[in-house]
Image: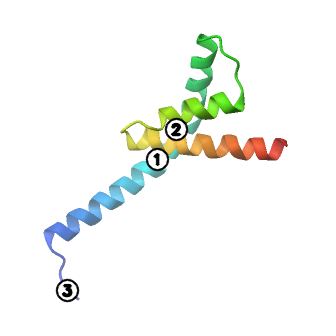
């Protein structure tokens, strides 16, 4: 078996780290959704699925991997709930 170079090992580690952060970030979807509802309430806007999804997607544009993963999970769950409800 060939030994891996330090560069290969570093790339693999970074890949595993990013994957782990994304998985951990998916656990934050309830917080992201709750924050979106609070922001809409504070702005006295109507809370509709469309406005929630738009606000959560804007939150997902963050540079933080965990926030991105949580926002993506929140949007997916919102869309799933809407599909079940129709």
Where residue 63 appears, as percent x and y from the top left, is 36, 39
Residue under label 3, please give it. Answer: 2
User: Disc 3 or 1, which lies upstream in sequence?
Assistant: 3
Residue at far right of view: 86
Is disc 3 in contact with disc 2, using a CB cutoff of under 8 Å? Answer: no
Name the side, left or right, on which 82 lies relative to 31.
Answer: right
- Classify 16 as above or below 83: below
Q: CA distance from mark 1 to mark 2?
A: 8 Å
Looking at the picture, how far across and down is residue 10, in whole percent? 21, 63
The residue lying at 51 percent from left, 41 percent from top is 70
Q: Residue at x 53, y 39 (%)?
A: 71
Label 2 Cα crowd, 10 Å radius (few <14 / some 14-19 / many 20+) = some
Mark 3, residues whose alpha carbon is within 10 Å: few (<14), some, or many (≥20)? few
Q: Nearer the viewer, residue 51 or 69?
A: 51
Q: Are marks 3 and 1 in contact (CB under 8 Å)?
A: no
Lower position in the chain sequence, tag 3 or tag 2:
3
Pinpoint residue 5: horizontal percent, then vertical percent. 15, 74
Provide the residue designation for mark 1: 24
Q: In the displayed structure, would residue 37 be above or below residue 22?
A: above
Q: Residue at x 78, y 46 (%)?
A: 83
Give the spatial CA distance, label 3 vs label 1. 33 Å
Q: Secondary structure at mark 1?
A: helix
Quarter occupied by residue 6: bottom left
Which quarter shows the N terminus? Answer: bottom left
Cα separation, mark 3 vs mark 2, equals 40 Å
Q: Secondary structure at mark 3?
A: loop
Camera-side residue: 37 or 57? 57
Give the residue at mark 2: 28
């Amino acid at each position: 078996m060939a030994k891996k170079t330090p560069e290969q090992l570093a790339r693999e580690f970074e890949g595993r780290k990013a994957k782990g952060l994304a998985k951990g970030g998916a656990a934050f979807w309830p917080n992201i959704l709750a924050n979106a509802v609070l922001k809409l309430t504070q702005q006295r806007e109507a809370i509709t699925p469309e406005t929630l999804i738009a606000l959560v997607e804007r939150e997902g544009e963050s540079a933080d991997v965990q926030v991105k993963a949580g926002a993506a999970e929140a949007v997916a769950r919102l869309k799933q709930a809407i599909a079940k409800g129709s």
